[in-house]
Image (cartoon, coloured by chain):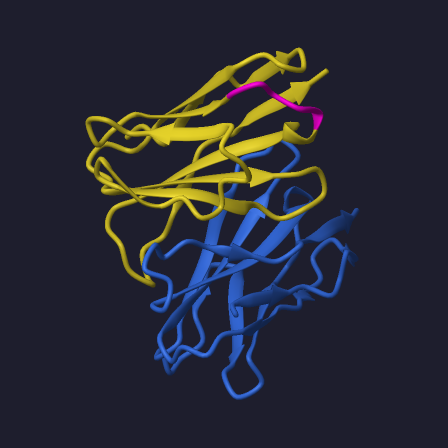
Protein backbone atom coordinates (compact mmCIF):
# COMPACT_ATOMS: atom_id res chain seq x y z
CA UNK A 1 0.00 0.00 0.00
CA UNK A 2 1.11 3.54 -0.63
CA UNK A 3 2.43 5.37 2.40
CA UNK A 4 4.25 8.60 3.16
CA UNK A 5 6.13 9.04 6.41
CA UNK A 6 7.31 12.36 7.80
CA UNK A 7 9.03 11.74 11.12
CA UNK A 8 9.66 15.35 12.16
CA UNK A 9 6.51 16.92 13.66
CA UNK A 10 8.35 20.22 14.15
CA UNK A 11 11.62 21.83 13.13
CA UNK A 12 13.40 25.07 13.95
CA UNK A 13 15.88 26.79 11.69
CA UNK A 14 17.75 30.06 11.97
CA UNK A 15 17.01 32.63 9.30
CA UNK A 16 19.40 32.38 6.31
CA UNK A 17 20.43 28.82 7.17
CA UNK A 18 19.50 25.68 5.22
CA UNK A 19 17.09 23.05 6.55
CA UNK A 20 16.20 19.52 5.47
CA UNK A 21 12.71 18.10 5.93
CA UNK A 22 12.57 14.32 5.83
CA UNK A 23 10.18 12.19 3.81
CA UNK A 24 10.16 8.46 3.14
CA UNK A 25 7.64 6.69 0.97
CA UNK A 26 6.43 3.23 0.19
CA UNK A 27 5.00 1.98 -3.08
CA UNK A 28 5.33 -1.17 -5.13
CA UNK A 29 4.91 0.73 -8.41
CA UNK A 30 7.93 1.69 -10.48
CA UNK A 31 6.29 4.83 -11.87
CA UNK A 32 5.33 7.45 -9.33
CA UNK A 33 5.60 11.12 -8.56
CA UNK A 34 6.66 12.84 -5.37
CA UNK A 35 5.48 16.31 -4.40
CA UNK A 36 6.11 18.80 -1.66
CA UNK A 37 3.48 21.33 -0.63
CA UNK A 38 3.66 24.27 1.77
CA UNK A 39 0.66 25.20 3.89
CA UNK A 40 0.92 28.59 5.67
CA UNK A 41 -1.38 29.46 8.52
CA UNK A 42 -3.82 30.92 6.00
CA UNK A 43 -4.57 27.36 4.92
CA UNK A 44 -3.90 27.20 1.19
CA UNK A 45 -1.72 24.39 -0.14
CA UNK A 46 1.11 25.76 -2.26
CA UNK A 47 2.95 23.46 -4.64
CA UNK A 48 6.72 23.66 -4.21
CA UNK A 49 8.48 20.93 -6.16
CA UNK A 50 7.98 17.67 -8.06
CA UNK A 51 10.22 14.63 -8.61
CA UNK A 52 9.36 11.82 -10.97
CA UNK A 53 10.55 8.32 -10.21
CA UNK A 54 12.43 8.10 -13.51
CA UNK A 55 14.07 11.51 -13.21
CA UNK A 56 17.80 11.00 -12.93
CA UNK A 57 18.55 14.44 -11.56
CA UNK A 58 17.29 15.86 -8.30
CA UNK A 59 14.58 18.47 -8.83
CA UNK A 60 15.31 22.09 -7.96
CA UNK A 61 13.03 25.13 -7.87
CA UNK A 62 14.71 28.28 -6.66
CA UNK A 63 15.60 27.82 -3.00
CA UNK A 64 13.93 24.41 -2.91
CA UNK A 65 15.65 21.18 -3.89
CA UNK A 66 14.62 17.60 -3.49
CA UNK A 67 17.19 15.07 -2.32
CA UNK A 68 15.84 11.98 -4.08
CA UNK A 69 17.34 8.66 -3.00
CA UNK A 70 15.37 6.01 -4.83
CA UNK A 71 17.00 2.95 -3.27
CA UNK A 72 16.25 4.30 0.19
CA UNK A 73 12.80 5.50 -0.86
CA UNK A 74 13.44 8.93 0.51
CA UNK A 75 12.57 12.34 -0.93
CA UNK A 76 13.82 14.97 1.47
CA UNK A 77 13.12 18.66 0.87
CA UNK A 78 16.02 21.05 1.28
CA UNK A 79 15.28 24.74 1.76
CA UNK A 80 18.32 26.94 1.39
CA UNK A 81 18.74 30.41 2.88
CA UNK A 82 15.61 30.18 5.05
CA UNK A 83 13.37 33.21 5.26
CA UNK A 84 10.83 34.18 7.91
CA UNK A 85 8.09 33.59 5.35
CA UNK A 86 9.09 29.94 5.13
CA UNK A 87 7.46 29.31 8.51
CA UNK A 88 4.60 26.94 7.66
CA UNK A 89 3.50 23.32 7.54
CA UNK A 90 5.21 21.24 4.86
CA UNK A 91 3.64 18.13 3.39
CA UNK A 92 5.27 15.42 1.32
CA UNK A 93 2.90 13.60 -1.02
CA UNK A 94 2.98 10.82 -3.58
CA UNK A 95 0.90 9.48 -6.41
CA UNK A 96 1.48 6.36 -8.52
CA UNK A 97 0.06 4.58 -11.56
CA UNK A 98 -1.39 1.73 -9.55
CA UNK A 99 -4.02 4.15 -8.36
CA UNK A 100 -6.12 5.01 -11.38
CA UNK A 101 -7.40 8.18 -9.76
CA UNK A 102 -3.87 9.50 -9.29
CA UNK A 103 -4.89 10.89 -5.96
CA UNK A 104 -2.22 12.31 -3.69
CA UNK A 105 -1.27 10.43 -0.55
CA UNK A 106 0.02 12.88 2.05
CA UNK A 107 2.27 12.53 5.04
CA UNK A 108 1.40 13.98 8.42
CA UNK A 109 3.48 17.08 7.80
CA UNK A 110 6.35 18.96 9.42
CA UNK A 111 5.85 22.35 11.02
CA UNK A 112 8.83 24.58 10.26
CA UNK A 113 9.55 27.66 12.32
CA UNK A 114 12.19 30.09 11.09
CA UNK A 115 13.83 32.10 13.86
CA UNK A 116 15.04 35.65 13.19
CA UNK B 1 -5.43 33.58 -14.35
CA UNK B 2 -7.81 32.59 -11.60
CA UNK B 3 -6.92 29.73 -9.35
CA UNK B 4 -9.20 27.23 -7.68
CA UNK B 5 -11.89 28.91 -5.63
CA UNK B 6 -14.06 27.47 -2.90
CA UNK B 7 -17.11 28.78 -1.12
CA UNK B 8 -17.99 29.36 1.57
CA UNK B 9 -14.62 29.78 3.25
CA UNK B 10 -16.14 29.10 6.64
CA UNK B 11 -19.28 27.23 7.55
CA UNK B 12 -20.79 26.58 10.95
CA UNK B 13 -23.53 23.99 11.02
CA UNK B 14 -25.61 22.58 13.81
CA UNK B 15 -25.42 18.84 14.17
CA UNK B 16 -27.95 17.25 11.86
CA UNK B 17 -27.98 20.03 9.28
CA UNK B 18 -27.11 19.49 5.64
CA UNK B 19 -24.28 21.51 4.07
CA UNK B 20 -23.10 22.09 0.51
CA UNK B 21 -19.54 23.10 -0.32
CA UNK B 22 -18.69 24.50 -3.73
CA UNK B 23 -15.51 24.23 -5.77
CA UNK B 24 -14.68 26.18 -8.94
CA UNK B 25 -11.63 24.54 -10.55
CA UNK B 26 -9.22 26.18 -12.92
CA UNK B 27 -10.86 26.48 -16.32
CA UNK B 28 -10.04 23.55 -18.58
CA UNK B 29 -8.82 21.28 -15.82
CA UNK B 30 -10.05 17.76 -16.38
CA UNK B 31 -9.36 16.26 -12.98
CA UNK B 32 -10.97 17.40 -9.74
CA UNK B 33 -10.29 16.05 -6.27
CA UNK B 34 -11.83 16.58 -2.86
CA UNK B 35 -9.76 16.08 0.29
CA UNK B 36 -10.59 16.31 3.98
CA UNK B 37 -8.02 17.74 6.36
CA UNK B 38 -8.49 17.25 10.07
CA UNK B 39 -6.72 19.64 12.44
CA UNK B 40 -2.98 19.01 12.55
CA UNK B 41 -3.05 16.28 9.91
CA UNK B 42 -2.35 15.88 6.23
CA UNK B 43 -5.20 15.98 3.72
CA UNK B 44 -6.99 12.71 3.05
CA UNK B 45 -8.60 11.82 -0.25
CA UNK B 46 -12.37 11.79 -0.50
CA UNK B 47 -13.32 11.55 -4.17
CA UNK B 48 -12.11 12.13 -7.74
CA UNK B 49 -13.78 13.33 -10.93
CA UNK B 50 -12.53 13.11 -14.46
CA UNK B 51 -14.67 15.66 -16.28
CA UNK B 52 -18.21 14.88 -15.08
CA UNK B 53 -17.53 11.24 -14.23
CA UNK B 54 -16.92 10.35 -10.59
CA UNK B 55 -14.30 7.65 -11.02
CA UNK B 56 -13.28 7.12 -7.42
CA UNK B 57 -15.30 7.74 -4.29
CA UNK B 58 -13.47 5.30 -2.10
CA UNK B 59 -12.50 7.97 0.42
CA UNK B 60 -16.00 9.19 1.25
CA UNK B 61 -16.40 8.28 4.94
CA UNK B 62 -20.10 7.45 4.85
CA UNK B 63 -23.18 7.58 2.67
CA UNK B 64 -23.91 10.98 4.19
CA UNK B 65 -21.25 12.37 1.87
CA UNK B 66 -22.14 12.99 -1.75
CA UNK B 67 -20.27 14.83 -4.51
CA UNK B 68 -21.19 15.86 -8.02
CA UNK B 69 -19.73 17.65 -11.01
CA UNK B 70 -22.60 17.59 -13.48
CA UNK B 71 -21.09 19.67 -16.29
CA UNK B 72 -17.47 18.80 -15.77
CA UNK B 73 -16.53 22.12 -14.20
CA UNK B 74 -17.98 23.27 -10.86
CA UNK B 75 -18.25 20.60 -8.18
CA UNK B 76 -20.33 20.42 -5.02
CA UNK B 77 -19.61 18.30 -1.97
CA UNK B 78 -22.73 17.72 0.10
CA UNK B 79 -22.79 16.40 3.62
CA UNK B 80 -26.14 15.32 4.99
CA UNK B 81 -27.04 15.19 8.67
CA UNK B 82 -23.68 16.61 9.74
CA UNK B 83 -21.94 15.12 12.75
CA UNK B 84 -19.23 16.62 14.95
CA UNK B 85 -16.63 14.31 13.43
CA UNK B 86 -17.27 16.00 10.08
CA UNK B 87 -15.57 19.16 11.40
CA UNK B 88 -12.52 19.68 9.20
CA UNK B 89 -11.16 21.71 6.32
CA UNK B 90 -12.42 20.49 2.97
CA UNK B 91 -9.95 21.10 0.17
CA UNK B 92 -10.66 20.99 -3.53
CA UNK B 93 -7.88 20.53 -6.08
CA UNK B 94 -7.82 20.46 -9.86
CA UNK B 95 -5.33 19.17 -12.35
CA UNK B 96 -4.93 19.79 -16.07
CA UNK B 97 -4.93 16.08 -16.87
CA UNK B 98 -4.39 12.77 -15.16
CA UNK B 99 -1.06 11.10 -14.60
CA UNK B 100 1.66 10.84 -12.03
CA UNK B 101 3.39 14.09 -12.97
CA UNK B 102 0.50 16.51 -13.14
CA UNK B 103 0.49 19.02 -10.34
CA UNK B 104 -2.70 19.49 -8.36
CA UNK B 105 -3.69 23.09 -7.67
CA UNK B 106 -5.52 23.54 -4.41
CA UNK B 107 -8.22 25.96 -3.41
CA UNK B 108 -8.19 27.83 -0.08
CA UNK B 109 -10.48 25.27 1.53
CA UNK B 110 -13.77 25.44 3.41
CA UNK B 111 -13.49 25.16 7.17
CA UNK B 112 -16.55 23.32 8.45
CA UNK B 113 -17.38 23.43 12.13
CA UNK B 114 -20.25 21.29 13.37
CA UNK B 115 -21.62 22.34 16.75
Give whichever of B114, A26 is nearer the camera: B114
Give whichever of A32, B21 is nearer the camera: B21
Give whichever of A55, B38 is nearer the camera: B38
Above or below residue B112? Residue B26 is below
Judged from this view, the residue extending furthest toward the bottom is A71
Range drawn in magenta: B80-84
Q: Position of residue A111 (x, y in %)?
A: 72, 50
Q: Is residue B49 magenta?
A: no
Above or below residue A79? Residue B6 is above
Q: Colour of chain A?
A: blue
Q: Position of residue B56 (x, y in %)?
A: 36, 48
Predominant SS along the magenta part: loop
Q: Position of residue B58 (x, y in %)?
A: 44, 48
Judged from this view, the residue extending furthest toward the front is B63
Residue at 22%, 35% in the rendered image: B52
Residue at 42%, 29% in the rendered image: B66
Q: Is residue B111 left or right of residue A94?
A: right
The chain whose colour is yellow is B
Could you say which quadrant of the image residue B3 lies in?
Answer: top left
Residue at 52%, 20% in the rendered image: B80
Above or below residue A14? Residue B52 is above
Q: Position of residue B47 (x, y in %)?
A: 41, 42
Above or below residue B104? Residue A16 is below
Amino acid sequence: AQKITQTQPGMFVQEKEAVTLDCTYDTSDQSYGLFWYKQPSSGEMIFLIYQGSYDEQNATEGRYSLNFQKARKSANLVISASQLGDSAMYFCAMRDRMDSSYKLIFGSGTRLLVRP
Amino acid sequence: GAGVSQSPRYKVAKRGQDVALRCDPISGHVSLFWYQQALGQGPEFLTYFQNEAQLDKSGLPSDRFFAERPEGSVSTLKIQRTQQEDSAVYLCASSLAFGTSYEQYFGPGTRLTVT
